[in-house]
Image: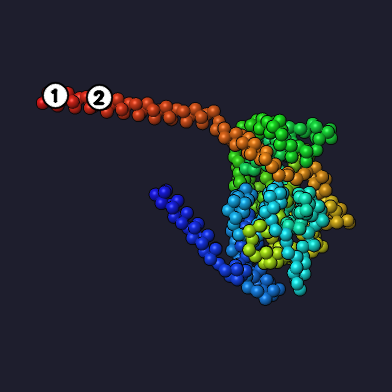
Amino acid sequence: MNRLIKIVCVLAACLGMLSSCARTDKERSKILKIYNWADYIDEGILDEFPVWYKEQTGEDIRIIYQVFDINEIMLTKIERGHEDFDLICPSEYIIERMLKKKLLLPIDRNFGKTPDYLDNISPYIREQLNKLSQPGMETTDYVVPYMWGTAGLLYNKQFVTQDEVMTWDCLWNPRYKNKILMKDSYRDAYGTAIIYAHAKELADGTVTVEQLMNDNSPEAIAIAEDYLKRMKPNIAGWEADFGKEMMTKNKAWLNLTWSGDAVWAIEEAEAVGVELGYEVPREGSNIWYDGWAIPKYARNVKAASYFLDYLCRPDIALRNMDANGYVSAVATPEILEAKIDTTIEEYSNLSYFFGPGNDSIRIDRVQYPDRKVVERCAMIRDFGDETELVLEMWSRVKGDNLNTGIVLLIFAVFGLLFVWVVYRRIRDYKQKQRHRRRRRRW
């Protein structure tokens, strides 16, 4: 049965390739293929864009939309499968890798009568992503920044104090055994472990967060592995998406997660009477950036570029923020006005993002981190050839996830099964011997 299913899948894939190849350039010019993270856009925008595009260009367009859940899966489809997606949404380290491998096409900013909204992107975000630039290839000529945020600790205020989550030490505290969830992300786990291992050096100013998180030497990998294995007895699970739900149901008290997921969880928890908070520990953390890009094998660069322009309209950016909880890279007065919350007592310095004069804003600090938080964070770069070594370490950390009790139970079960099999064989052998003796008597 499994073999039949595999054959059917292969045939379906071949038919898909043939149908794709069979499309004429004229037919393909009316299709926009988008490959995005799940739950990462207001889906109403996908319905409305064709209408807007027709108004701007006089041309019809139909969207084919697919989702992925891991950067590497998306990269493999483009790099090895030569898939003809017109738009993809990679994270910063994959953007860097794709630039190195020349897998991206430049954005066509010839929008005719249509306003160019790409200039609405915050200069700060542009500056950060341009650190990934390659010789002759400036990142923001190939990438339109989309969402960004931090990695930090979501915590249950009933069981954990704010002071405790202001240091990564809480993840190694046996008090929280089986009450901690870790994001199933080798990069965030690696960064957290290596930062915590060098907390003293960070405090002394002898090393920076950026240097630590991007040190993938054998010595650094060994240190990260040691610290992650020490943390493991406290871990209730490695989660990709269920952490938010477990936190809102009081099943976990601490969760290393991303700021956008934290925004969602805090809102959901409040509705059921659970009070959650989110902090980026004082030692520092990862600050990440996602952006839209046009891959090398795209077949509709024009529609892709228009779609990127459309996403940078302030009203569209606000809708996407409301849909996924993350922070848009768009930094216009309309965005700021919509996000100011006068019920918040604390003020944040957002002059780095919205520009001079915005150093005392009442706004959601989980979504929009204060300048002091941003200054103690850094972007994790592409690990290059060392990626495999880090992945091997991550596999070793997660691979021995069974505790001693479970291991003993498994051995006991297998031992009983072995004894039972041996017993059955001896019994069957004796029965056969008895049958033979009876035949001889007859």
On the image, the x and y values in percent for residue 384 come to 69, 42
Q: Label 2 to label 1, Cα distance in Å?
A: 16 Å
**Residue 201 is drawn in which quadrant?**
top right
Residue 156 visible to the viewer: no
Label 2 SS: helix
Q: Hey, what amino acid is under mark 1?
A: Arg
Query: Residue shown at 60%/34% (left/top)?
Result: 396
Q: Which mark identifies residue 430? A: 2
Q: Amino acid at mark 2?
A: Lys
Please name the residue shown 84% across and 35% down the image.
205
Residue at horizontal 39%, vertical 30%?
Answer: 417
Residue, disc 1: 440
Left or right: 372 as drawn, with respect to 103? right
The one nearer the camera, 124 or 135, is 135
Residue 137 versus residue 254: which sits nearer the camera? 137
Q: Is residue 149 above or below residue 33?
A: above
Residue farthest to the left?
442
Classify the position of the C terminus by image quarter: top left
Question: Is residue 351 in view from this perspective?
Answer: yes
- Say which element carries label 1: helix
Q: Nearer the viewer, residue 110 or 428?
A: 110
Q: Is residue 389 left or right of residue 11?
A: right
Quarter residue 58 falls in: bottom right
Query: How far across and how far down the image is residue 151, in percent?
Result: 71, 45
Label 2–label 1 contact, CB within 8 A = no
Determine the image quadrant of residue 294.
bottom right
Residue 275 in percent (x, y) is at: 68, 47
Q: Is residue 227 above or below residue 251?
A: above
Q: Residue at x 72, y 59 (%)?
A: 106
Q: Of callouts 2 and 1, which one flags the residue occurring earlier in the amino acid sequence?
A: 2
